[in-house]
Amino acid sequence: MLKKFSLMVQGTTSDAGKSTLVAGLCRLLKRQGWSVAPFKSQNMALNSAVTADGGEIGRAQAVQAQACGIEPTVHMNPVLLKPNTDIGAQVIVQGKALADMDACAYHEYKPRVMGAVMESYRHLQAHYQAVIIEGAGSPAEINLRDRDIANMGFAEEADCPVIIIADIDKGGVFAHLYGTLALLSESEQNRVIGFVINRFRGDITLLQGGLDWLEQTTGKPVLGVLPYLHGLYLEQEDAIAVQQGERGKFRVVVPCFPRISNHTDFDVLRLHPDVDLIMVPPNQQLPPADLIILPGSKSVQGDLRFLREQGWDNAINRHLRFGGKLIGICGGYQMLGDMLHDPLGLEGEAGSMPGLGLLPISTTLAPEKQLRRVTGTLTLEGETVPVIGYEIHAGVTEIPSGYTQPLQLNDGQQTAEDGFCSADNLILGSYLHGLFDEPAACNALLRWAGLSIDTAPDMQQLREDGINRLADCLADHLNMDKLFSLLEQWESDRTR
């Protein structure tokens, strides 16, 4: 009888469904009485989450922890890479920023960081019956095989079994699965215990011939064919979701910077029945809007230069002249001020540059990143509502003396003020990610911006509904009996 186990989910491509399969497995195992935790050794994403102890991890692992019914910890994602250029990233190890490295420097560093990866993995093994591990990208990236810590390199070190998932909706699913397996070494092939096909729509009887061929050719079973779950909501690991369902009449526009971060801030607006959310990509003009929101940024000065190059600053000024409302969140908040100072060259060349000059504030970048999970209140136009969210920023913003800030935030240890509202009541800035997540706060902010209908969705319930829908899907379409049989055989072979 299986008492403890680890299982790794790898994919044939990015966005094959690894994150969602791990989340669904975590919830399904929790329902069955297992104590379970998620793990991803290395994550590259600009959507991150803050743990209770002030560490930073990938947002996908925070969602997976919710599926397990546990608090996220830094051990669930010991290495987080946050790109700040096309060839470089901030390297975060066990929740804390270590250094900025280019791709070559990080590749050389991987053997050293493997110690932290294995320490975190062993910690989870010691505290949970099951650890469900997510790979990154594809294990068949030949150029990344050397010193790999995210896919088969980790699986070999941890000696865990692997299932491989592929997305049939993109086409070529049998080539993806067969080719991925063929490009693995013999020992890596031997630890693959089965396949999962994701996002299938149509008559499954027409797929059966291909399934039979795959199993006969590879000797690996297909453990499940998962249907395409239309309208499923789970927070994105990194890709910006550009599609929205039924569009409302109240238009919210978000310009997408090259280093936009934590754009999950806008999921609630994407799902709002009375909001038309438009994420504007590069080389497009900002359309007329009721509300413009400047999002977070991993490279504030670079993204502010980009904003000006696009002419978006002129569109923002025109929007304000006509009485439109403007919100800046985190890096977007910093851009709204008079000056941005980077005396240590943390984002490039040391120096200062003017901000948009829309708020009488200035920001200085500091090496120590501020990471807090908070609750508190937002006061707008005499109304006070609850807020909940998190802060991730390296800037320290100076506020004019004697000014009362609109947010009061508590991290469990102290209460501090946050944010700024302009004298003309057109512009609001805040460091708080998740500013819209609490329904009362979302309603208040949209009322301030001009929407009179209080119809904000409950994001916490939507997350739960999405996770439960995944688990229900796996219960119906994944052969859990076969999976457990394979896991038991794996453990038996290891103890001989």
Image: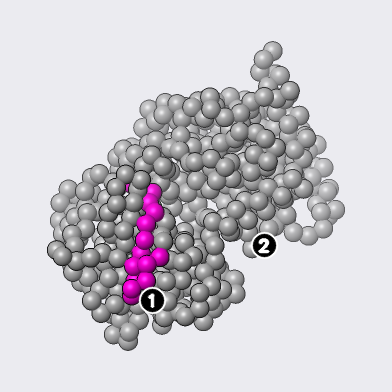
The three-letter amino acid code for the residue at tag 2 is His
Image quadrant holding the N terminus, namely top right
Q: Does 112 appear above or below 289? A: above
Q: Does 362 appear above or below 250? A: above
Q: Which one is in front, 58 or 169?
A: 58
Task: Name, please, the residue furthest toward the top.
Answer: 496
Task: Name, please, the residue furthest toward the bottom.
Answer: 322
Mark whose residue sits in front, 2 or 1: 1
Residue found 60% across the figure and 49% down from its top: 20
Q: Which one is in front, 374 or 25?
A: 374
Residue found 17% across the figure and 48% down from its top: 344
- Classify mark 1: helix, strand or loop: helix
Q: Which residues are magenta?
A: 371-385
Q: Is residue 129 left or right of residue 107?
A: right
Where does the image place residue 455, in percent across and percent down from the top left? Answer: 53, 72
Q: Is residue 314 visible?
A: no
Residue found 50% across the figure and 78% down from its top: 453
Q: Does 303 appear above or below 83? A: below
From the image, give the main secondary structure of the stretch colored magenta.
Answer: strand
Where does the image place residue 35, in percent across and percent down from the top left? Answer: 61, 33
| CA neighbours of label 1 inside 10 A, class few (<14), some (14 to 19), many (20+) | some
Image quadrant holding the C terminus, namely top right
Where does the image place residue 423, in percent across and percent down from the top left? Answer: 23, 76
Residue that numbered label 1 is attached to? 448
Residue that numbered label 2 is attached to? 230
Q: Is residue 145 left or right of residue 207?
A: left
The three-letter amino acid code for the residue at tag 1 is Trp
Residue found 38% across the figure and 27% down from its top: 112
**Precedes in sequence: disc 2 or disc 1:** 2
